[in-house]
Image (cartoon, helix red, strand yellow):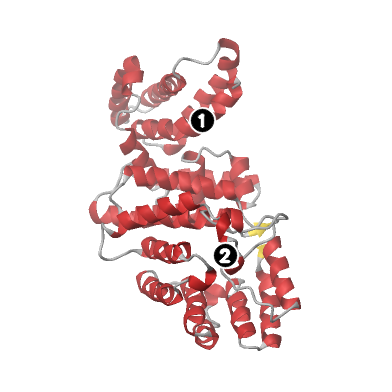
Amino acid sequence: MTATATIEAVWRIEQPKLAARLARHLRDIGLAEEVVQDAFVTALERWPREGIPHNPAAWLTRVATNRALDRLRRTTLIDGKHRELAIDMAALEREVPDIEAALDEDIGDDLLRLIFTACHPVLPAEQRAALALRLLGGLSTPEIARAFLVPEATVAQRIVRAKRALRDAGIAFETPRGVERRERLGAVLEVVYLIFNEGYVASAGSDWLRADLSGEAMRLGRLLAALMPDEPETLGLMALMELSASRFAARTDKSGNPILLLNQDRGRWDWSLIRRGLDRLNRAMALTTTPGPFLLQAMIAACHARAATAADTDWIAIAAYYQALALAAPSPIVEVNRAVAVGMAFGPAQGLAVADALRGEPRLKDSHLLPTVRGDLLEKLGRTDEARAEFLRAAELTGNDRERALLLGRAASPGVGGGTQN
């Protein structure tokens, strides 16, 4: 492995740990990220010439720590009011001589603090996602821009604004406890699932799925599950992602075109991921008698995973889980999915009744999801002209090229069927 490749590999593994460790002392996520980046730039300059250190993580920690100390000294000299920073500087200096021994000390707590701070609800969802991918996923600005199909300048602005907002709001770099922790955990899990979903079905562009982006979300999820092993919702999210990701190989044909759930070759599903997901689900269910939103969604995914064929799917159970999810976390998207489940369990007329109740929902006005579901249900009822109109409307609204082609194909050949879930 070349020095550059080694640095890139070490960056992905060590960058979150270093940022978390230094943010605890600097109390400024932006500054912590800057000194960590400085350390990796130094590595890029020196390792190819001097050779890779015996312990790359310790080397980077020492360099980043020294950069942080320089920043703290300058800050303390410029502003005599920063007494607390001076105290932290002294603590950081004490760690430097034996940096290898101290490398993993409290790193779990530091990472947990970083996750909760980067995903703080004071930030808009898109800023949380960008900051989380930058700090915890180690992705560059161009990589994040490609992931969400937005200009690099947009991503850069989101990250800068997120850091500024956290600093200006005086957000403490800490892991919340008790009720506050439970309240903020939801925001953390939502960010991870947002990233996963953007990879599972890309909202725009020419690719139906982005397995690399979903993989980053699963990596963050595993980190959370390791740091919080007794949180049922964390285990539920991880189970949901693993069960969903198990279908990746079956979700597209050789040309990259979508294959919907009912038509997938289940022999191509990843059964090792399914086993891991079901194991996490069982552990999560043993920890609570009142499943939260992610645990309920994992229970729905498990119904699909346990079905040997599409015909074996327990749609009555899925409809019941969606009803429970609608009570635990009400949203129009949940209702759209419930319409699908009700239609499969009790017939398309009942599913259409659920979908029709959403036609005036303003939050669905620009979404392709409701017309897609209505088109499918109308098609099953033999109302082909109405179904065609719904598929055409959905095709206009989707930003994904592959999905648009699928919907236009269904509009051109109503009555062929195919379902809506993927």
Residue extending furthest left? 178
Pinpoint residue 33: horizontal percent, then vertical percent.
47, 33
Q: Quadrant of residue 278?
A: bottom left
Task: Please determine whether, in this image, residue 233 is positioned above or below residue 261.
Answer: above
Pinpoint residue 374: horizontal percent, then vertical percent.
59, 80
Q: Which residue is mark 2?
A: 422
Residue extending furthest top? 50
Q: Quadrant of residue 49?
A: top right
Relative placement, left or right, of 33 versus 50 is: left
Q: Which residue is mark 1?
A: 11
Q: Residue at x 39, y 64 (%)?
A: 299
Dividing the image into 4 quarters, which one contains the N terminus? top right
Task: Please determine whether, in this image, residue 195 is positioned above or below residue 55.
Answer: below
Q: Quadrant of residue 398?
A: bottom right
Q: Secondary structure at mark 2?
A: loop
Q: Residue at x 69, y 78 (%)?
A: 416
- Name the amino acid, label 1: Trp
Relative placement, left or right, of 69 versus 416 is: left
Tell me the CA gap for discs 1 and 2. Answer: 34 Å
